Image: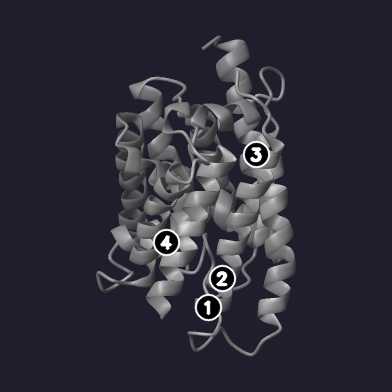
Amino acid sequence: MQRLVALLAGLLFGAGLALSGMLNPMKVQNFLDLFGAWDPTLLVVMAAGLAVTFIGYRFVLSGARPLYAESFALPPTQPIDARLIVGALLFGIGWGLTGFCPGPAVASLVFGLWPSVLFVLAMMAGMLAVHVLTRRGGEAAPGMADG
Amino acid sequence: MTDFTPLAGAAGGLLIGLSAVILLGGLGRIAGVSGIFRALITGQAGVALSWQALFLLGLLLGPLLAMLLGGFDPASIAFPGNPVTTVLGGLLVGAGTALGAGCTSGHGICGLARLSARSITATITFMVVAIVTVYVLRHVAGA
């Protein structure tokens, strides 16, 4: 049942990205081009998604536990640190350069287009580099329940 | 140019939000694609048929489903930039999401709904930086 729930959630997420036009990196980059070819669609996607999670999360979290798990695995409350800011900075530059963020990049792999493949391979390299470097530094790995 | 498509955008956004609510209500998990993907490639997700693997399988099949139902045309996908910006962007997105523990879905859709101070900070930061990056790319460098 847990696997069915995960598969269903992934399906809805992927279908939502496709339907909303967010699989198209040009459309996403146009959203970021406030002073040029601005396409506000991403703002509508985010607002609609947030409206559902804002209400849905409150309903779900008012229960004692999830339907098919022992407890909620929410990221622990941590202070805002340099690592978060540097991470968001790097991510923002990469997102702006390509119009790709992890969800659409991975979902678009199904169409076998080479820029998607190239991007995801590079993204894996970036993730693994941080994983190896922070592990060597003895720093605790970030929680797995994060974004 | 791409057209402003608010109806399709709202419908797609509702599905993404619904996905996140189902994942939290069903498994108690946050729908953050970078974290899920990272757990898989670093081996932290464990068994091959982990929930993370099935979520990613669904994420790949979802666009096909949308296409079969007539809600998506893969020919609409266009890539800005070139192989160099694609690789550089991928590296930065990978390293950045690993350091900042999240991306547009985890911080932007799930974290903001929980009014997490970290997610609000991260979302504002990457939005502003991405807008500045595109401004420099298109209006200063002239790409």
Labels 3, 1: one chain: no
Badge 1 marks a residue whose secondary structure is helix
Q: Which mark is on residue B36? A: 4
Q: How many labels sit on residues?
A: 4
Badge 2 marks a residue whose secondary structure is helix
* Parent chain of label 4: B
The residue at which mark 1 appears reads as B26
Circles 1 and 2 in contact, beta carbons < 8 Å: yes
Please say if A64 is above or below A20.
Answer: below
The residue at which mark 2 appears reads as B22
Q: Earlier in the sequence, mark 1 or mark 4?
A: 1
Furthest residue to the front? B69
Residue A80 in view, yes or no: no
Disc 3 to disc 4, how far (Cα)? Answer: 22 Å
The amino acid marked with disc number 4 is Ile
- Residue A135, given in percent of the width and then of the height, sits at 34, 62
Closer mark to the observer between disc 2 and disc 3: 2
